[in-house]
């Protein structure tokens, strides 16, 4: 019996060795940085040999702080990651596999995860915060006349600053998996700009300047065309489509086995979701909110609903697998028109508010502060990063080149709108 057991063990080891050699062969023959294994071993056996959690950063649209709360949270997160990892010049993109951002959150994702000429991300977290403080209010606020009147009468803002910032860089120039939504008026459906689609299919690579203009188009529809001009959409802000893109990111990962071959459920995820402050509408008594206030209320309500649903999906693992950073400006300042120079002070106060999380069958409860939550999850992310050094198989297999023009079933993008010139 002992001999049979030893033979069985050797057989399994031979299978695993074969898998490793297959990975190395793919790397050198096909040029993949992290090649997808040819699966001959059962998934459970391959996973037990060493794969980790996919690290996800999700960033909401503008909220009541026009993106400043999320940008400041990222600054604190990057600082904690540097301190805990001992890497003084580490960037936020070094510690996440996937970033999803909507509206001004999409701009933050683009700034922090697009590769510059030196190979490093274009912006540090500190630079991104300064960008949002200077420009966020232009990219997030709806007209006092109401969004629907403005959508069809005035041009979008931000185009010039985005072109100056990104030049000709496109989705293919992003460092990690990137997902940025908008709403396409042509099809009446959300459209997701996706790095995975850009590298795998003709017609789905877009300039980053156009992506940012589309996801922040609060002042009017933006005609957005792919680099090869095969795909055309009429985009308005991602705040309408999915102000909180966390569920979109999770769905994309779980259905994309090419890039995330061993991710089978939420237990295989490590998610940090950053809000931008629940809106304070300043409506008293029977006063009717403005149309723009209604839009923000709806957007943040949907964001909270997504948070609750995601938290329920994580269940008991939420304490170490899922973090939601959100705050309420109304608890701090009774005036909705906070001066821009004071926003940073207000946001720092929001970060020391109690963190509120949804608990399965128990409603919501308060924990430590938002800042404490950020520091705790920074430690968890560093642990996952360090653990990967001993992995036999890759957790993430990002595709580097276009190999096919046919659609993927895992695509997050609205595929039906591809059109010719």
Image: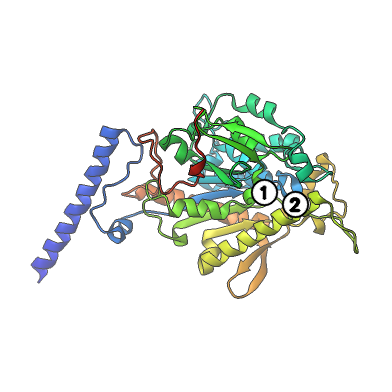
Give the structural element (helix, strand or loop) at label 2: helix
- Which of the 4 quarters of the picture holds residue 2? bottom left
What number is the disc on residue 295? 2
Q: In the drawing, does residue 224 fall left or right of residue 347?
A: left
* Residue 387 place in picture, x, y as percent: 41, 52
User: Is residue 60 visible from the viewing direction of this image?
Assistant: no
Marks 1 and 2: in contact by CB < 8 Å?
Answer: yes
On the rendered image, what quadrant is the N terminus found in? bottom left
Give the structural element (helix, strand or loop) at label 1: helix
- Which of the 4 quarters of the picture holds residue 25? top left
Q: Residue at 29% across / 56% down in the picture?
A: 46
Q: Residue at 19% across / 58% down in the picture?
A: 12
Other residues around mark 1 within 10 Å, as few (<14) / some (14–19) / many (≥20): many
Residue on which disc 1 sits: 240
User: Is residue 357 visible from the viewing direction of this image?
Assistant: yes
Q: Residue at 47% across / 36% down in the picture?
A: 198
Q: In this view, does 161 lie above or below 194?
A: above
């Amino acid at each position: 019996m002992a001999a049979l057991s030893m033979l069985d063990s050797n057989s399994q080891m031979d299978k695993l060795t074969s898998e490793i050699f297959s990975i190395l062969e793919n790397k050198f023959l096909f040029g993949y940085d992290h090649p997808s294994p040819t699966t001959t071993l059962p998934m459970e056996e391959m996973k037990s040999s060493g794969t980790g959690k996919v690290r996800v950063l999700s960033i909401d649209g503008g909220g009541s702080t026009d993106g400043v709360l999320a940008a400041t949270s990222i600054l604190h997160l990057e600082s904690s990651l540097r301190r805990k990892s001992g890497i003084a010049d580490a960037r936020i993109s070094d510690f996440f596999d996937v970033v999803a951002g909507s509206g001004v959150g999409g701009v933050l994702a683009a700034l922090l995860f697009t590769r510059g000429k030196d190979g490093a991300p274009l912006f540090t977290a500190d630079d991104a915060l300064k960008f949002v403080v200077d420009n966020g209010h232009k990219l997030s606020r709806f007209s006092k006349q109401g969004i629907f009147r403005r959508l069809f009468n005035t041009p979008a803002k931000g185009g010039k600053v985005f072109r100056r910032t990104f030049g000709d860089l496109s989705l293919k120039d992003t460092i990690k998996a990137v997902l940025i939504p908008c709403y396409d008026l042509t099809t009446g459906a959300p459209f997701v700009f996706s790095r995975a689609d850009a590298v795998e299919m003709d017609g789905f690579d877009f300039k980053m300047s156009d992506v940012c203009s589309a996801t922040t188009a609060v002042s009017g529809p933006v005609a957005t065309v792919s680099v090869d001009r095969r795909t055309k959409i009429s985009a308005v802000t991602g705040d309408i489509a999915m102000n909180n893109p966390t569920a979109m990111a999770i769905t994309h990962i779980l259905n994309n086995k090419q890039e995330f071959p061993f991710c089978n459920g939420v237990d295989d995820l490590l998610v940090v979701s950053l809000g931008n402050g629940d809106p304070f509408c300043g409506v008293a008594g029977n006063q009717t909110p403005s149309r723009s206030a209604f839009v923000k209320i709806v957007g943040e309500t949907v964001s909270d609903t997504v948070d609750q649903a995601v938290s329920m999906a994580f269940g008991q693992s939420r304490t170490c697998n899922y973090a939601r950073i959100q705050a309420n400006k109304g608890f701090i300042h009774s005036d909705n028109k906070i001066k821009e120079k004071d926003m940073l002070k207000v946001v720092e106060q929001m970060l020391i508010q109690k963190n509120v999380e949804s608990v399965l069958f128990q409603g919501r409860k308060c924990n430590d502060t938002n800042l404490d939550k950020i520091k705790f999850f920074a430690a968890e992310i560093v642990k996952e990063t360090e653990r990967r050094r001993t992995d036999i198989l890759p957790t993430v297999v990002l595709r580097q080149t276009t190999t096919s023009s046919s659609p993927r079933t895992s695509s997050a993008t609205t595929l039906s709108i591809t059109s010719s010139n």
